[in-house]
Structure formats: structure tokens, C-alpha cells
Image (cartoon, rainbow, N blue to C red):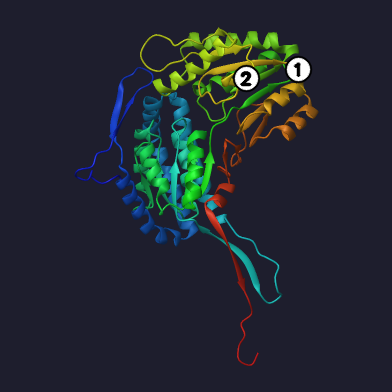
């Protein structure tokens, strides 16, 4: 990994200290790169760009396979560090590393197949398109699945001939540093660089004239700031941002099964998944049985001690503020809703009932193990409620009625609609979030298009002497 150079004399910049959110013990402290150091790293990436862009796609793919092998060889170390740094359960963290390696292999194969199109022109001319890399790609990735998300963006950027400057979240800098070392050891110098730092460092990267494309996975507030910056610099922006994903439960479905889906969507990884269930609309015909079963599942999870902590105390404060505000405005919490005693950043699985549409927790992303429930009188009123809001990431519908499923698919203004399964999807799937949830395709073959320009080529018959 190409780390920041030694701190220049007379300058100061901060450090990042991470505490284990499970028990409050220290994970470690890392120095943040200063804006000046970030610009030096961008300059070296720019110099490496021409050679990497000129590398054959198959050769780039072979190195991506080597990078996947390197990740697999350090999967346990990465997963355990991720667990200590963010509180993510070990098996989930290990799965994220394995998914990251698989994604690198996917782009190793897709890169050489990324092709242009032939165009119908004059009979004796050639007309076609080719794709070319955008140049220097600045990737800003999150803490909740730090290896898998980073590898998706890194893999697509490198496969298409871009050079990468990666800034992992300041909430998991140790994982980001280790990932950066593993990747940098595989690729030519300065093709993949990792920069450790907070918002100031990230701003220096995205504002720099060397930056040609920015990819961001994180909060909508940050994404909106990046959109304004990119409009000024001309950098291409890809972003997957926050969500307030609804779960709509129709009459006629088994309430216990629906409660299991709701609990999984709301509480997995302590609710810290981009597409977690954030608000629930349940048909009145099954609401009583559903709510009772959901409370039982939350209570059992809390009693087991298996629920992961939130990433840090600041996140817990944000989640609890939304819960407390909902309770003050008329919601009830038959389970959870209080900060537990002890070290770390744990928060209980919480079920909120009687949630009015006006509550902030029904309108904004929560990113914690909270299941807010509203009862609706019929499917269409529930669908109308689920289709409202400023986000457009994902939504789930549980129904045995095919017509209702098709109606929901047509009406929900989101990038991904899931029917009868809160998580899951085919390998290589690509979604296009909307509104405050982002812009551009993330993952899948379409992400290769985001990292490239299309060049149209016209070759006419030469005019020679005697023609």
C-alpha cells in the first residue's frame, strides 16, 4: 500500500482512534493523511494511469484474480479485525471478505468482455464504439461492509483501466489499511493507493483536479455534498446513499413468517445494512398476530446476547434519539428502546408500535436495530405509504397475491423491489438508486459502464491517387 509520506514540518493533522464497540477496548490509532499528502498520492496515481490504461484487459483480469487469492489467504485476519473495529459478527465479516474476493473474480472475467457496439454506416466504412477509462477514480467506502463494498468498486474501476485512490471510512481505518496493503502488493506501483483520513481528507481528494470519477457509498448528506462538488469539478459521480426502505405486508400471508422476515430485515447486523428494513406497513387483518410475533422475536434476540453492537457510541446516540422522539410523540415500545448498562455501543432490538407517518423514524434512515410498525387498512393504502418519502433505495413486499405484487413493482419508486424475501438476489445484480438514495449503477456489469467513456469511431474508405 502506498501510504501518506511523513508529515511535513510545521503542519498538523489529526489521528483516528478506534474503540471496539463490543467492550470499549482500544483497537488502535492511525494518523490521518493531510490534504497535502492526499494530493501527492493523487499525483502519483495520475502518473501511473497511462501505463495501467494501456495494459491488456486480460492482463488486468489476471491481476484481479491474484488480488482475490490474496484476500482469501488473509480472510480470517480481515474478518477478525473487522469484528474488533466495527462490531460486525465474525461469520458476517468473513462472508463479506469472501464476497469481496468473489466480486474481484467477477470483474476479472467481465473486464475483458466489456465491449462496444458496431454501428450501421456507409457500406465501405467502419463505425463502432470503444470504451476508455475515465482516469483517476477516488473511492469513498463505508464501514458496515467494508471489504465487500470496496472490492466491488475497486474491481470495476481497475478492470476498466482506471487507477484507484481509496479512502475507507474513518470508522474502520485498520480494515481499510490492511485491505490496501493486500491489494497494493499485487498491482503495479500507484495503481491502487489507500488514504486514511476523515472528511477533510476526503474533501481534498474529491476537490482535486486530478480526480476524474468519484464513487461514494455512505450517507445521503455526504452524497449530496459530493454532488455539489462534482458539479464544480466536472468529475463523474456514482453514489449509493441512505435509504428508508419500507416493508409492506399484505393480508393472507402467514404472520409468523412475515414477522421472521421483518426481524431479519430490521435486526441483521444490528440494522446496519444499507437495505435494512426501516419502516413496516402491515395489513390490519394480520396486524395483531404479526406484532405479537415480532415482539417475541426481538425479545428472544435480546435475551440471547447475539445481537451485534452498533459501530460506536455516536451511532447509538443517533439511533436512540430517533427512538426517544418517537416515544415522546405517541409510539410505544413493547420491547427495547433503552440504552443498556455496560461498556461498548450495544442497543437492543426495538419494536415500535403505533407509529404515525409524521415521525422522523418513519421518514429518515435509522441505521440501528429498530422495527417501526404502522397498521394499514388495506393493501393500496399501505402501498401509497410505502411509496412516499425522499429516498429511493429498496423496498420489500410480502404477498401471496400476484396482482398486488405486480402493482407494487410498478408503483414503488426505488432501485430494487424484493417480493417475499427481504434479502437476496442473483449474482451480478446491479441497482440504480433514486432521489436522495443516490445516482448511477452500483455493481454488476453496468458498473463497468459508469467507470468508462464511450468513444465513437468512424473509419471511411481512404481516397487514394487514381480512385
| Along the viewing direction, whichever of 308 and 213 lies nearer the viewer | 213
Q: Residue furthest left?
A: 9
- How many residues crowd around disc 2 within 10 Å: few (fewer than 14), some, or many (20 or more)? few
Q: Quadrant of the N terminus?
A: top left
* Circle 1/circle 2 CB separation < 8 Å: no
Residue 349 as seen in the image, left or right of residue 196: right
- Coordinates of residue 271 in the picture (x, y in percent): 52, 22
Residue at point 45%, 30% (across, down): 94
- Coordinates of residue 71 in the picture (x, y in percent): 41, 40
Q: Secondary structure at mark 2?
A: loop
Where does label 1 land, which residue? Answer: 251
Q: Which quarter of the figure has residue 243? A: top right
Q: Secondary structure at mark 1?
A: loop
| Along the viewing direction, whichever of 47 and 55 lies nearer the viewer | 47
- Coordinates of residue 265 in the picture (x, y in percent): 58, 23
Q: Is residue 260 above or below residue 135?
A: above
Q: Quadrant of the C terminus?
A: bottom right
Structural distance between the alpha carbons of marks 1 and 2: 24 Å
Where does label 2 land, which residue? Answer: 358
Residue 339 as seen in the image, left or right of residue 260: left
| Along the viewing direction, whichever of 222 and 28 lies nearer the viewer | 222
Q: Residue furthest bottom?
A: 466
Q: Is residue 143 above or below residue 127?
A: above
| Along the viewing direction, whichever of 425 and 213 lies nearer the viewer | 213
Residue at point 68%, 65% (across, down): 119
Q: Which quarter of the figure has residue 327? A: top right
Amino acid at each position: 500500500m502506498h501510504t501518506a509520506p511523513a508529515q511535513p514540518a510545521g503542519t498538523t493533522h489529526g489521528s483516528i482512534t478506534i474503540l471496539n464497540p463490543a467492550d470499549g477496548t482500544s483497537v488502535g490509532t492511525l494518523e490521518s493523511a493531510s490534504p497535502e499528502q492526499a494530493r501527492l498520492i493523487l499525483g502519483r496515481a495520475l502518473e501511473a494511469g497511462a501505463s495501467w490504461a494501456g495494459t491488456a484487459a486480460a492482463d488486468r483480469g489476471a491481476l484481479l484474480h491474484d488480488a482475490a487469492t490474496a484476500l482469501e489467504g488473509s480472510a480470517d485476519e480481515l474478518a477478525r479485525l473487522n469484528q474488533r473495529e466495527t462490531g460486525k459478527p465474525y461469520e458476517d465479516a468473513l462472508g463479506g471478505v469472501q464476497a469481496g474476493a468473489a466480486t474481484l473474480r467477477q470483474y476479472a472475467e467481465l473486464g475483458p468482455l466489456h465491449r462496444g457496439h458496431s454501428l450501421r454506416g456507409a457500406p465501405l466504412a467502419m463505425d463502432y464504439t470503444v470504451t476508455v477509462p475515465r482516469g483517476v477514480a477516488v473511492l469513498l467506502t463505508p464501514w458496515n461492509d467494508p471489504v465487500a463494498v470496496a472490492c466491488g468498486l475497486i474491481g470495476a474501476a481497475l478492470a476498466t483501466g482506471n487507477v484507484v485512490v481509496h479512502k475507507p471510512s474513518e470508522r474502520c481505518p485498520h480494515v481499510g489499511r490492511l485491505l490496501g496493503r493486500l491489494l497494493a502488493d499485487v498491482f503495479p506501483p500507484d495503481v491502487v493507493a489507500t488514504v486514511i483520513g476523515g472528511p477533510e481528507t476526503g474533501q481534498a481528494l474529491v476537490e482535486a483536479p486530478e480526480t476524474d470519477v468519484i464513487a461514494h457509498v455512505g450517507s445521503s448528506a455526504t452524497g449530496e455534498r459530493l454532488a455539489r462538488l462534482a458539479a464544480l469539478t466536472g468529475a463523474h459521480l456514482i453514489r449509493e446513499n441512505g435509504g428508508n426502505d419500507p416493508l409492506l405486508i399484505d393480508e393472507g400471508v402467514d404472520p409468523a413468517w412475515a414477522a421472521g422476515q421483518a426481524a431479519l430485515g430490521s435486526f441483521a447486523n444490528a440494522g446496519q445494512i444499507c437495505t435494512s428494513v426501516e419502516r413496516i406497513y402491515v395489513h390490519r387483518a394480520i396486524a395483531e398476530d404479526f406484532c405479537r410475533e415480532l415482539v417475541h422475536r426481538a425479545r428472544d434476540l435480546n435475551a440471547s446476547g447475539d445481537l451485534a453492537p452498533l459501530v460506536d457510541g455516536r451511532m447509538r446516540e443517533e439511533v436512540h434519539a430517533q427512538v426517544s422522539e418517537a416515544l415522546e410523540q405517541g409510539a410505544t415500545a413493547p420491547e427495547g428502546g433503552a440504552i443498556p448498562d455496560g461498556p461498548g455501543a450495544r442497543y437492543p432490538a426495538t419494536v415500535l408500535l403505533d407509529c404515525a407517518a409524521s415521525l422522523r423514524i418513519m421518514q429518515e434512515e435509522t441505521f440501528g436495530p429498530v422495527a417501526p410498525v404502522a397498521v394499514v387498512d388495506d393493501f393500496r393504502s399501505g402501498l401509497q405509504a410505502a411509496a412516499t418519502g425522499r429516498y429511493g433505495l429498496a423496498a420489500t413486499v410480502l404477498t401471496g397475491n400476484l396482482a398486488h405484487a405486480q402493482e407494487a413493482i410498478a408503483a414503488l419508486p426505488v432501485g430494487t423491489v424484493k417480493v417475499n424475501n427481504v434479502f437476496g438476489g442473483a449474482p451480478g445484480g446491479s441497482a440504480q438508486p433514486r432521489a436522495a438514495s443516490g445516482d448511477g449503477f452500483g455493481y454488476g456489469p453496468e458498473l463497468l459502464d459508469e467507470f468508462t467513456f464511450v468513444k465513437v469511431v468512424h473509419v471511411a474508405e481512404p481516397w487514394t491517387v487514381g480512385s
